[in-house]
């Protein structure tokens, strides 16, 4: 166990988080504008005792996001499996629509500095690679 291990896995040993290259084309749009466009997303799936905890989340590299369309907020949340999330709002759009783990626990380094978008706040388009 490293100094930056996720405490959640010790507390909930049946909780699983799997990350892998998404292998699909992911576009994030807001009001018709493309905010993110990538073929380099990470797909994250979260289960507990074999049951899905949340829908699949796509984490997009910052290089493929129009960062100038985002505004950092003071909002933060803590996840015992991933670490502390920081948030962005879309300029002239929904607040806290985007989250990122800038210092994730060691088990979640695959999503470090990538961005995820709330699907109810943007339009996500996923197509075959």
Image: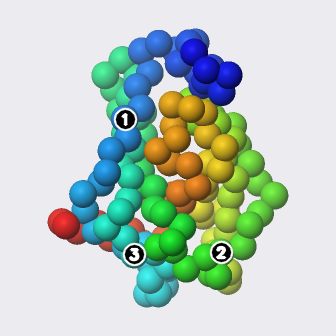
**Percent of width and height locating residue 126:** 28, 66
Mark 3 secondary-structure assignment: strand
Mark 1 secondary-structure assignment: strand
Q: Residues within 10 Å of mark 1 (few under 14, many from 20)?
A: few
Answer left or right for 6 relative to 36: right
Please, which colouring scheme is shown? rainbow
Image quadrant in which the C terminus is located: bottom left
Check contact, mark 1 vs mark 2: CB within 8 A: no
Q: Label 2 belongs to which residue?
A: 70
Q: Nearer the N terminus, badge 1 or badge 2?
A: 1
**Percent of width and height locating residue 83:** 64, 36
In the image, residue 44 sits, relative to residue 86, either above or below, namely above
Q: Residue furthest left?
A: 128
Answer left or right for 68 relative to 44: right
Answer left or right for 122 relative to 80: left
Q: CA distance from mark 1 to mark 2?
A: 27 Å
**Percent of width and height locating residue 50:** 31, 22
Q: Label 1 belongs to which residue?
A: 18
Q: CA distance from mark 3 to mark 1?
A: 22 Å
Q: Residue furthest right?
A: 74
- How many numbered discs sit on the rendered protein? 3
Check contact, mark 3 vs mark 1: CB within 8 A: no
Q: Label 3 belongs to which residue?
A: 37
* Residue 120 appears in the rendering: no
On residue 96, the disc is: none
**Which residue is at a point 66% across and 44% down the rendered structure image?**
103
């Amino acid at each position: 166990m490293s100094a930056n291990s996720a405490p959640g896995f010790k507390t909930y040993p049946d909780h699983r988080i799997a990350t892998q290259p998404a292998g699909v084309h992911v576009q994030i749009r807001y009001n018709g504008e493309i905010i993110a466009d990538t073929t380099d997303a990470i797909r994250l799936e979260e289960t507990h005792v074999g049951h899905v905890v949340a829908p699949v989340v796509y984490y997009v590299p910052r290089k493929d996001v129009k960062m100038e369309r985002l505004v950092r907020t003071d909002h933060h949340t803590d996840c015992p499996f991933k670490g502390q999330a920081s948030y962005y709002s879309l300029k002239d759009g929904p607040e806290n629509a985007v989250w990122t783990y800038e210092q994730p626990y060691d088990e979640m380094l695959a999503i470090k500095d990538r961005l995820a978008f709330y699907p109810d706040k943007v339009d996500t388009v996923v197509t075959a690679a």
